[in-house]
Amino acid sequence: MGRPKVYYIDTRKIFIQLAFIILLVVLGIFYLRWVKVTKVQFISPEFESSWEITESDVIKRIARGVKDASEIKGAAPEDVIIMKLFSQKETKVYSFASPEVIYDIVGGRCLKPSAELHGLLNIAARELRLRSPYGELLDWDKVQQHFLPGEKVKICDLDSKKSFMAVRKGGYSHADIQPISENDSNIIREIFGGNWSWKKRAVVVRDGEVKFAAVLTGMPHLQNGESGCFDLRLPLSCDLNKDDSMACRMMYYKASGKLDEMLQEAGPSEIILLLFTAIDQRDWQSARMMLTSLEGADRDKLENLIGVSVFNLNENKYMVYQALVSVSFRDGPYNDRRNLVVRLRQDRKTGAYLAEPDFLEALFDS
């Protein structure tokens, strides 16, 4: 018999192999962490809202859904929701107008989401609407079908951000609502500056999963024998130029976040009427949007004003108007008629007409 064969183990080679394997594992872990989506954010410029998702399971489902989406023909959508997928490596940005198609902004391609991703995008769109400070512009015929007498809703004043609970008590062309508690009634009074008033406020009403734009009037009255009710108005039809006052129309657009669109489409004389309407309603936020500057925009003077009405409006020369108005103040004078000269200019960027503020001194002089 020959001598047995002796095998030698090269420990250095094994060590190098193990070190290489460990290095690959570490690099793999770091790479996965580098490319792993850790946060998803949805942004809606239209609703002025955003929603950030940090739940790992939901993030995985969204990232997987985007990865598995199939490419289709199409163009970039308009009126979009932005979806951002964040990782250490990069931020991928997509947009969609409806969950049927998403658009890869960097890659310039359209993708068809899977059924799961489609559902998640639907949830995101609904969540952005609920997080928006604005409500949908719905007409009364549609809203009254589910906003029935006895229904409780949450109402938020757009400017002050104060909210209260109320119940619908009745109403035919509008809703008569009653605050649920004395505290809710006090909040309404605070919204109207501490005094009951027939002035109007832009409000957003939340009824379950629906949020709609409305106008609240701040004067309590009787309804079906119950005191302390308030008028809550919505557009009577889809055509906002019908049936409603200019003050109501302005507040509807404001509560739906579309006041800037209304102002851009308004002609010179309409802008002046809208401006005086905003001043009459003591809505300085809206009035500012129609002025070239805030010179003479003294809020104390505005709060002292009871009301202003335009009796006559004529164009003297191009972009210069003569307005005959009646103005009243808390401490007088009352129903004082004044001739005001209102000068306009057109904004080069938006095309909207704006008023020079020099007429305010004559208007607020009490």
Image (cartoon, rainbow, N blue to C red):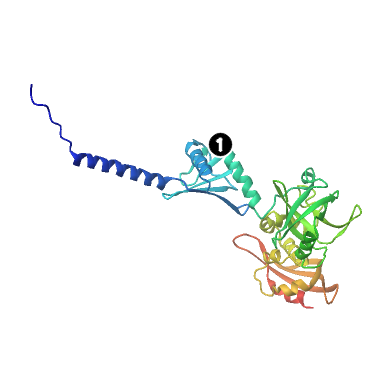
> Is 300 rendered above or below residue 269?
below
Q: Residue furthest bottom?
A: 366
Seen from the viewer's position, the closer of residues 340 and 278 is 278
Q: Residue furthest top?
A: 1
Seen from the viewer's position, the closer of residues 20 and 285 is 20
Position in image of residue 239 (x %, y %): 76, 49
- Is residue 246 at all visible to an observer of this figure? no
Q: Residues within 10 Å of mark 1 (few under 14, many from 20)?
A: few
Indicate the quadrant where residue 215 lies.
Answer: bottom right
- Is residue 336 at all visible to an observer of this figure? yes
Q: Residue at x 11, y 26 (%)?
A: 4
Q: Residue at x 71, y 61 (%)?
A: 162
| Placement of the C terminus among the 4 image quadrants | bottom right
| Placement of the N terminus among the 4 image quadrants | top left
Position in image of residue 317 (x %, y %): 72, 68
Indicate the quadrant where residue 305 lies.
Answer: bottom right
Seen from the viewer's position, the closer of residues 299 and 195 is 195
Q: Residue furthest right?
A: 225
> Is 255 rendered above or below residue 25?
below
Indicate the quadrant where residue 294 lies.
Answer: bottom right
Q: Residue at x 78, y 59 (%)?
A: 184
Secondary structure of the residue carrying tag 1 is: helix
> Is 222 rendered above or below residue 148?
below
Q: What residue is pinned by disc 1?
A: 116
